[in-house]
Amino acid sequence: MFGLVKGLGVTLKNMTKPKVTYNYPAEPIPVPDRFRGIQHFDAEKCIVCNQCALVCPTDCITLTGKRNPDPEKKGKVIEIYDINFEICILCDLCTEVCPTEAIVMTNNFELATYSRDDLFKNMQWLHDNNQNIRQENMSSKPPGAAGGAK
Amino acid sequence: MSDQEKEQEKELTTETKAANVMSEETVEIKSASKEQDVQKPDALSQELKDEGSVKNESASEEQGIQKPDAPPSQEVTDEGSVKNDSVSTGVDVENTVTKPQAASVPPKKPAATPRPAAKKPVEEKPLEPSRKQPWLDKFVVKLKDLEGSEYLEDAFINRANSDLPTLVVKSEWWRYLALYLRNHPDCQFHYVQNFSSVDYETHLEVVVHLFSFPYKERLGVRVKVDRTEAKVDSVADIWAAANWNEREAYDLMGITFEGHPDLRRIMLTDQWVGHPLRKDYVPYDEGV
Amino acid sequence: MLRTEEMLLNMGPQHPSTHGVLRLVIKIDGEIIREVDPVIGYLHRGTEKLAEDLTYTQIIPYTDRLDYVSAMTNNYAVVHATEKLMGLEIPERAEYLRMITMELNRVASHLVWVGTYLLDLGAMSPFLYCFQDRETILNLFNELCGARLTYNYMRVGGVKWDAPDGWLQKVEEFVLYMQKELATYHDLISGNDIFLQRTRGIGIYTKEQALSYALSGSNLRVTGVPWDLRQHQSYSLYHQFQFEIPIGEKGDVLDKYHLRMQEIAESLKIVKQVLGVIKEGPIMGKVPKVLRVPEGEFYTGVESPRGELGCHIVSNGKNKPWRLKFRRPSFYNLQILPDLLKGENISNLVAILGGIDIILGEVDG
Amino acid sequence: MDVFFYLGPIILMLLLLGFVTYAILFERKVIGWIQNRPGPNQVGPWGLFQTIADVLKLLLKEDVVPGKADRSLFKLAPIIAFVPAFAILAVIPFTETWQFGDFAVGLLYYIAISSITIIGILTGAWASNNKYSLLGGMRSAAQMISYEIPLVLSVVGIVMTTGSLDLNDIVLAQKKVWFIVPQFLAFLIFLIASLAELNRTPFDLPEAESELVAGYHVEYTGFRFAFFMLAEYVYVFAMASLTTCLFLGGWLPLFGLTMIPGILWFLLKFSLVVFSLFWIRATMPRLRVDQLMQFAWKVLLPLSLLNIFLTAIFKEIPVLSSFY
């Protein structure tokens, strides 16, 4: 019987404790810098190395490149860059392998929509998603997801 | 499912709890069915064995191959001893196990392509004998004395896997060996650490990692199963843990465990076509 | 004479206390259970098949989704197996970080168990208190690796992120706080007569049964077998630290509760010890550019909060595993359920099922 | 007087609906605070309209009658469950004047009428043709009938003391000291038994969410479901009122603070009882069916008999008899 009373005491004591809930939709939820949110893509930095598409475990990245229109420059420029957020698991591997930090994580995470089609994001959308970009992208560890050497 | 079978099932489950005894009734049915299926072993099996050993010599981490070609010489006495041992635990080995002498499947494919574990013969400097080697040796000697020891294809130390002693057996001998490993006082592998199955394209393998609490020893057993006619005796009544694992292996790898009390698909729907973990699996419905 | 008959009751896959999508087909006589047939597979995602087409690094995020309550341990299981096969050396700091995260994850996982178990028994508040403390751990993980549930934190050869500034202090604060907080849990739950009534003498099985069903973790230890892979097949750097393996006496659900509470305390103890010795240093070992695992077969188990989480890799020397099999402890532990439930009351079903502590993502693979 | 006679019940009904609305909100708030969260706070200021929104939602919902259900019984059940719940309020004396039916056997009437609800619950459970609801209904019937006995027997001590079944007399008999003091054992038994009668945690087995999903009303939706919920909360109201009258001295003031009107005193005591109901709900796990039955028959029943026995003895002891 005493145990029951003790339990009642604990619950009563908790009544006066400060509330721990977030007032979420009204106030943005604080996320740490390393938070893995929707990617931001910078087309100018991209060298079309295809590593992000290769490393993606769910194959949600589609990209094509074309020859650089400026004939004096070598290499390719990105033409199409889409991420399908229906299957993207925000695992962070694409930003890990990117040698030029063309694709980086942001701290935005609100992806809910009314239609599945809206989850298919193209290069322009990803480029415009430039708020709250994650500061620390490479950590102290440069090697990539493919097991790059230190 | 017939009433008799159901009965059998019930008995099996109840016995699993007690001392993993197989009812005599089941044994009779089983051995009868076995005797019809099996054919005489022939020279080819010897060939297969030899090739296996060659392959194993080339494998980098494998050492101390025991050629399990000793004939079952001391049949009577040894079997007697096994019997005595197992009687104490309430298992009649002689009755429960299909006689491996008579039981052998003609090798359909003599291991044409060796398993992926042995592709390149690499020149290796001889390694120090593993610390587990004496234990395995002792063990293999014992097994060799048993009836049907020619079905022990290989015994080696898996060095990469923290010196795990590993046995490779043919599917016909698996149940016999399982009973032995479970009940013999020198083994007492009461605990199934892992129950896995692998498709090597040439053949299938049931891989079981056992653990013996009294001796604090691990043992890996690989059971070679024919790919086209993937059948192996169930050990669900020996280790209760094998029950669902065998169902899983049946479901995903397509290995039929004969004598299993309730062999149904466990992960996929009952209408599923094919066994996904087979390397040649093609999804039946592309849309799914 | 009244005509009586057995009733077939279908529990799940949508049911509040089957912890996900477990379905139980129960034959009941009144409220007494005669037969149970668990039907699983509703959450089967074919992780093992998928893994055959993925590189070792790509597998790691998939393992997060097996046992989603303690994803760190899952990360570690596959990473550990790969490293062992490749014979890599892991920097000390990386191992320490792994141990901290794994032990914190164990605490979080057991907190979820305590909370949901009490919820199964009908008490609401302990659930929310447990989740509050778990929240602290998840926030710590969020700071460390940027996710709260699917961490994808460990890499073959080390860990992805070093601890941010001040993180280790926060962990230490949490450990101290949690050690005190455990007393509150005991006040609230352990002495509650109704809780004791509900759990005492329920779901008892013998040691032999437990071994035969290959139970592991707390489910095995509750029968009095002191078997903990962290000590007996020591991996990582656990051998450097002192901790005890609590075992049960009677083997009922009450014992399991006390056992898991003690395990929380032991985990906190380990974290505290690790915090005492962790030093600055590299967090990533020397790893080849492309992970090619040498040919061979490998099985290793790690102690997840639910038991022995094993990883069986068969490699053919390519950068993708030929076969990857997880020994999923929940899958093994769940098997004993039909045996335990025969002749029990329906209310006990919930108490016993909850006591096993299954995670359906893991059961179904 | 005549106007009050006809309008009174309607006013009471409206008051009751108001009470139920805010009792639910209060319950959710209290449980929220206990669990370190604010409780409902989105609809209206401080979440005041939360329950109203919930009820509106329930009324807008499609009225589903399962295909295999017994249609007429299914529709009848919520009414059978609700009507007695409202009828028993007639005898509750809120103050000296605020009472609708002042008759000599008020207590008996309360207990007799309130047990009709179980028929409604059982009917609903049976008519749903659902296994979970059947189990819930069976549990409910067994539980409520079992706990009725200690509930009644625990009150016998009070009846012996006052020599009346009239709730007015019982309240007035507490002028010197509330019955909670001399009849403390009876109070405990009554509290536990009333929790069980109300199907509230730790005795909420008929609904046992984690086992039976929702128990007897698992198939009910929309306003029929609302009726069951309403009946449940009206019983909370009634039972808290009864507890106040029987053990806490009804509208009688404490410390001779007569300037505070009786109705406020009543509400204060009443809220205290309601709060403790919610508080217990937030803390306790649920009992098991067999333990529940054993508890009723093996613990509560002997105890309540003992209580009657003790009351009888104390009545004969000169010093104590003034309390009894």
Image (cartoon, rainbow, N blue to C red):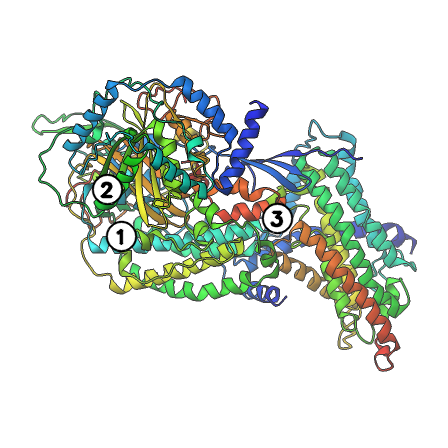
Secondary element at image label 2: helix
Q: Check the residue under mark 1 and report the chain it is in.
A: C
Q: Using a 10 Å C-alpha cutoff, classify the residue at mark 1 as few (fewer than 14 neighbours), some (14 to 19) or many (20 or more).
A: some
Q: Decide if residue C168 is on the left or right side of residue D128.
A: left
Distance from Cα at disc 1 to Cα at disc 2: 30 Å
Q: Where is residue A38 drawn, in percent x and y?
A: 33, 40
Q: Which residue is mark 1?
A: C236
Q: Which residue is mark 2?
A: B137
Callout 3–callout 1 Cβ contact below 8 Å? no
Residue D141 lies, with reference to residue B270, above or below; the image says: below
Distance from Cα at disc 3 to Cα at disc 2: 75 Å
Pick the front one: D322 or C347: C347
Q: Please indicate, yes or no, whether residue A25 appears anywhere in the rendered image.
A: no
Q: Check the residue under mark 3 and report the chain it is in.
A: D
Q: Nearer the viewer, mark 1 or mark 2?
A: 2
Q: Amino acid at mark 2?
A: Asp
Q: Where is residue C272 drawn, in percent x and y?
A: 32, 63
Image point 61% across, 61% down: which residue?
C193
Secondary element at image label 1: loop
Q: Decide if residue D259 is on the left or right side of residue D312.
A: left
Tell me the quadrant of the picture where the N terminus of chain C can be found.
Answer: top right
* Residue D50 tag number: 3
Image point 81% across, 64% down: which residue?
D305
Picture quadrant of residue A79? top left
Outermost residue, bottom side: D319
